[in-house]
Image (spheres, helix red, strand yellow):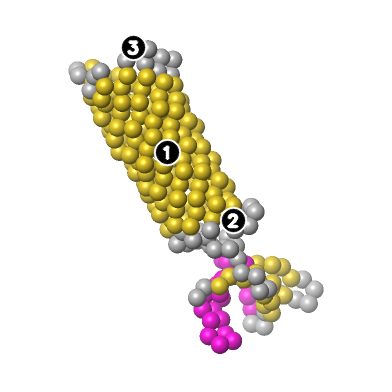
Amino acid sequence: MMRSFILILALSPVFSHATTAVVEKTKGNKALVSFPSGTTLVPGTLLYTNSKKMRPRRHYVEFSAKSIKTKDKVDIGSGSLDSSSDSSKLDLTYGWNTGTWMPWASLAWTQGHTDTTKTKGWGLGGGLNFNFIKNEPGQDLVPYASVGALLLSTDYYGTSSQARTQGLLWDGGIGALWYPFGELVALDVSYHLSFGKLDISGSETGKDQNSISGISFGTVLSF
C-alpha cells in the first residue's frame, strides 16, 4: 500500500532541507522510498518522518472559464460564407487521476454574439490528459497535454432567422496544474484548439467547418 510522508533530509549536523518522498513498499522495518528527480542521497544520510499522511489526489472536480474565438466556414446550397465571433465558455469537469493519466468528462455552456447574431450552446465532452510529471501528493506543478472530443449544439439568433449547428469537435490542448495551497486546491491554466464539421439546421441547411481556440482558467478541487 502506498503511503506518503514529509521527509527531512539531515545532510549535515548544521544544514538540512525538506523534501517530499513516497513510500512505495514496506516490509517489516524496511521501505522502498521514491524521491523527486534531482534529489541527491549518499550512504549514511539520515531521514526523519512525521506521522501525518498527505491528502490523495485520486479524483477531481474543476470549474473553468474560457474566452474563445470561433471561426466558421459555412456552406449552404451553392454558396459559402466565412465568419468569426467571440464568445465565452464555461466547463464543469469530473476526472480521475492515476498519476500519469487523467481521464475526464465535462459539461460545457457557451454564449456569444456578433453585430447581427446572438449564440447560445451546450456540449458534452470527454478525454484524457497526459501528465509530463506525475500528479501525486507533494508535486506542486504538473504540466500536461490533453486530447478529447466535444458533442456541441449551438443556437444562432439573428434579426430575422434562427439556425442551429450540431456535431462533434475534436480537441487538443496543453496546460499546467499548480497546487499553491497544499493538496486540496489547484489552479489550472491551459490553451485549447477544437475543430470539426457541424450540421446546420433551421431555415436553411448545410455544413459548418468550425474551429474554436482560447485560453482557459480553472479551479480544481482534488480528493
> Is 220 rendered above or below residue 91?
below
Amino acid found under the numbered disc labelled 1 = Ala
Closer to the chain start, of discs 1 and 3, is 1
| Amino acid found under the numbered disc labelled 2 | Leu
Q: CA distance from mark 1 to mark 3?
A: 27 Å
Q: Position of residue 99 (x, y in %)?
A: 47, 62
Crowding at label 3, few (<14), some or many (≥20) Cα neighbours within 10 Å?
few
- Give the x, y percent position of residue 32: 54, 79
Q: What residue is rendered at 46% in x and 43% in y? A: 92
Q: Which residues are magenta?
A: 20-42
Characterize the local packing of mark 1: few (<14), some (14-19) or many (20 or more) Cα atoms within 10 angstroms.
some
Separation of marks 3 and 2 at Cα, in angstroms: 50 Å
Q: Secondary structure at mark 3?
A: loop
* Residue at the extreme bottom: 28
- Pointer 3: what residue? 160
Q: Amino acid at mark 3?
A: Ser
Q: Is residue 33 magenta?
A: yes
Q: Earlier in the sequence, mark 2 or mark 1?
A: 1
Q: Residues within 10 Å of mark 2 (few under 14, many from 20)?
A: some
What residue is at 53 percent from the left and 85 percent from the top? 27
Name the residue carrying label 1. Answer: 108
Pointer 2 residue: 184
Cα distance between the residues tagged 2 and 1: 24 Å
Q: Is residue 131 magenta?
A: no
At a point 41% along the width and 51% down the height, the residue shown is: 104
Earlier along the polypeptide chain: callout 3 or callout 2?
3
As drawn, 223 above or below 190: below
- Element at label 2: loop
